[in-house]
Image (cartoon, rainbow, N blue to C red):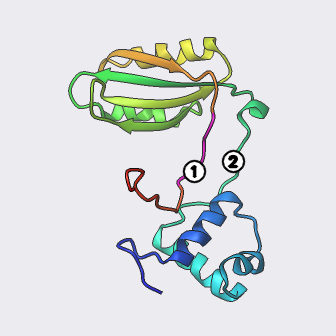
């Protein structure tokens, strides 16, 4: 079966997709779904882990069941380059789920999840205590329609006829 530019064939993409939906499925069940034996699936999964394609197998927590109903995105503007050691230490805060360096009218975007607006205010105070933080813009998520891990599939262009 031919591999794409990323070294994946159709079975790899389907298998990785199934694993993102439920990483607890048995190798036999996965094998039935992709047309391989359980040992063949096991070997592929081992290769994915060794190569770093699968970075970790984790549990997805329900934010409402852990007291973190409040989801927001914070755009952070800084003096100079945004990735200072002090600023990157915020990654240790359990409220901070993602940190992205971006182009456009801001330096960084943070995805944060917490229990309340008061917790958000405390986090913003911690950010503003950093000397390189100039300003922030916050966007509170009212509803989440799609939230998922990286997907293995590749979409065809929506512009195709």
Query: Residue at coordinates 47% horizontally, 17% vertically from top-left?
Result: 138
Mark 2 surroundings: few (<14), some (14-19) or many (≥20) residues within 10 A: few
Q: What residue is at 75 percent from the left and 30 percent from the top?
A: 64
Q: How many labels does the image show?
A: 2
Q: Name the residue furthest front.
A: 161
Q: Give how far across and how far down residue 147 sits, in percent.
A: 60, 41
Question: Is there a contact, CB below 8 Å, between mark 1 and mark 2?
Answer: yes
Spatial separation of the CA atoms under disc 1 and disc 2: 10 Å
The answer to whether residue 96 is magenta is: no
Q: What secondary structure prevails in the magenta region?
A: loop
Query: Quadrant location of residue 86?
Result: top left
Earlier residue among tags 1 and 2:
2
Residue drawn at point x = 29 percent, y = 31 percent: 82
In the rendering, which numbered label is found on residue 8?
Answer: none
Q: Residue 149 carries which label?
A: 1
Q: Compare residues 4 and 63 and report the one nearer the observer.
A: 4
State the image coordinates of residue 158 (x, y, percent, origin top left).
Answer: 42, 51
Q: Which of marks 1 and 2 is in front?
A: 1
Instruction: Using residue 143 as the reference point, say whether residue 82 is left or right of it.
Output: left
Stretch in magenta: 145-150
Q: In which quarter of the image is the C terminus?
A: bottom left
Of the pair 111 and 84, the residue shown nearer to us: 111
Please provide percent x and percent y for residue 37. 70, 88
11 to the left or right of 134: right
In magenta stretch: residue 148: yes
Q: What element carries label 1?
A: loop
| Residue 60 numbered mark, or none | 2
Task: Say few, some or many: other residues with alpha carbon within 10 Å of mark 1 (under 14 / 14 to 19 / 20 or more).
Answer: few
């Amino acid at each position: 079966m031919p591999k794409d530019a990323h070294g994946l064939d159709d079975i790899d993409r389907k298998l990785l997709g199934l694993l993102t939906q439920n990483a607890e499925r048995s190798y036999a069940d996965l094998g039935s779904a992709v047309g391989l034996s359980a040992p063949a699936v096991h070997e592929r999964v081992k290769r994915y882990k060794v190569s770093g394609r699968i970075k970790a197998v984790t549990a997805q927590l329900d934010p409402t069941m852990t007291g973190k109903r409040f989801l927001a995105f914070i755009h952070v503007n800084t003096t100079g380059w945004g990735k200072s050691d002090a600023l990157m230490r915020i990654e240790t805060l359990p409220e901070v789920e993602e940190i992205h360096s971006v182009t456009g009218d801001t330096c960084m975007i943070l995805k944060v999840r917490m229990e309340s607006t008061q917790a958000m205010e405390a986090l913003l105070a911690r950010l503003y205590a950093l000397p390189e933080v100039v300003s922030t813009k916050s966007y509170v998520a009212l509803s989440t329609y799609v939230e998922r891990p990286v997907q293995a599939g590749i979409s065809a262009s929506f512009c195709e006829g």
